[in-house]
Amino acid sequence: MHMTRRGVLLASLALSMTAAAPAWAAPSAAPGRRLALYYQTQYTNGTYVSPLGLTEHGTGATHVLVAAVHLNDVNGPYAPVHLNDDPPEAAKFDAMWRDLKTMQGQGVRVLAMLGGAAPGSFRRLDTEFGTYYPLLRDFLRRYALDGVDLDVEEDMSLAGIVRVIDALRADFGPDFLITLAPVASALAGGGNLSGFDYEQLYRHRGGDIAWFNAQFYNGWGSLASTRDYDAVVRRGLIPAAKVVAGALTSPDNGNGHVGLATLKKTVGALRTKYSGFGGVAGWEYFNSQPGGTDAPWQWAAEVSTALFR
C-alpha cells in the first residue's frame, strides 16, 4: 500500500559515495525485467532528496515513479493538479524535474503515479471524464513523462478505468507505459481496493497494460517467500512478465517489511522459477535501507544483485 489504506473491497465487484567505479555497480537489466523505485518524498527535513543516486552509483534501476499526482476539484480552492501538496510547477520541484530529465537521458524511464491513498482523482475521472482527463493528459505532456502508474485506491467502475486506459493509449501511442498498482491479493482473486475486478480488466485491456506494480505488503501479500507471488501466476491469466513484486524499502514505510536478505532470497527464487519474472518495485526511495536517507540508492543496488545476476 502506498501510505495508509482503506478497508477491503472484494474482487468480485462489478465490472554519498563517489560515482567513479561504484562498489555497487550492477549489470545491465535483463530484457523485460524491471527495478522500479517510487519517489514520493522529495524533501526530508527541508533538504532535497535527488533521485540521481540511482544512476550515479550504478544500481541498475530501470524506472522511477514520481508520486503522487492528484486531480483536485476544479471548483475548489486548490490548483486542479497537485504533486503531493503543491502544484507540479512549484519552484520546489525545479531541481527534481531537471534530475529526472537527466535520468531519462541515461536510459531510466520516468512515470507519474496517479492516486494512492488520497481519494478523489479516480472518482473524478470516472464521473467527470471530460473535465478531468485533459488535466492529466496535459500534465503528462508538459513534463514529457514516459508513462503513468494508476494507483486506484477508491471505488471506480471497470468501464471508467478502461476509458482512461483507452484515452492514454490514443493520446500517447504504443510506447507509452501504462501500469497499475493493485494490492497483490487483487491479482489472486482476493481483497481489492479499486472497485473493479483486475482479472476482468486484464481480459479487456491486458495488451495495453505494461505491467502491474503489485503491493505485496500491508497485509495484502508478502515477499517473505514466493508463495503469494506464486498464487497470482497460478491463476493462469496474468503472466509473471507482467507482475512486478512491490516491496517496502524500509520498516518505516508500512507494515510487512521484509528484510533485505530475505527479500533477495525471494527475488532470486522468483527469477529462477519464472524466466519472464517482471521484477521488483520499491516503496519508497528516500529512506530505503540499508543506506537510509544518507544513501537511499543502496537498497536498489542490493536488490539488483538478486534480480539481474
Image: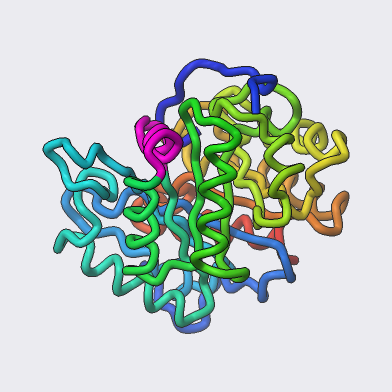
The relative height of residue 289 versus residue 24 in the rendered view (above or below) is: above
Q: Quadrant of the C terminus?
A: bottom right
Horizontal and vertical percent for residue 141? 38, 68
Horizontal and vertical percent for residue 59? 55, 67
Q: Residue at x 15, y 41 (%)?
A: 78
Quarter holding residue 91: bottom left
Judge left or right: residue 207 versus residue 149.
right
Judge left or right: residue 58 versus residue 122.
right
The relative height of residue 56 versus residue 112 in the rendered view (above or below) is: below
View extreme (left): residue: 77
Q: Is residue 41 visible?
A: yes
Q: Residue at x 56, y 66 (%)?
A: 176
- For the magenta stretch, what is the residue range? 115-129
Instruction: Judge whether residue 118 is colored magenta.
Output: yes
Instruction: Judge whether residue 285 is colored magenta.
Output: no
Judge left or right: residue 292 versus residue 83.
right
Which colour style is shown?
rainbow
Q: Residue at x 58, y 18 (%)?
A: 9
Q: Residue at x 82, y 37 (%)?
A: 230
Quarter holding residue 97: bottom left
Horizontal and vertical percent for residue 202? 72, 43
Horizontal and vertical percent for residue 15? 65, 28
Q: Nearer the viewer, residue 226 or 34?
A: 34
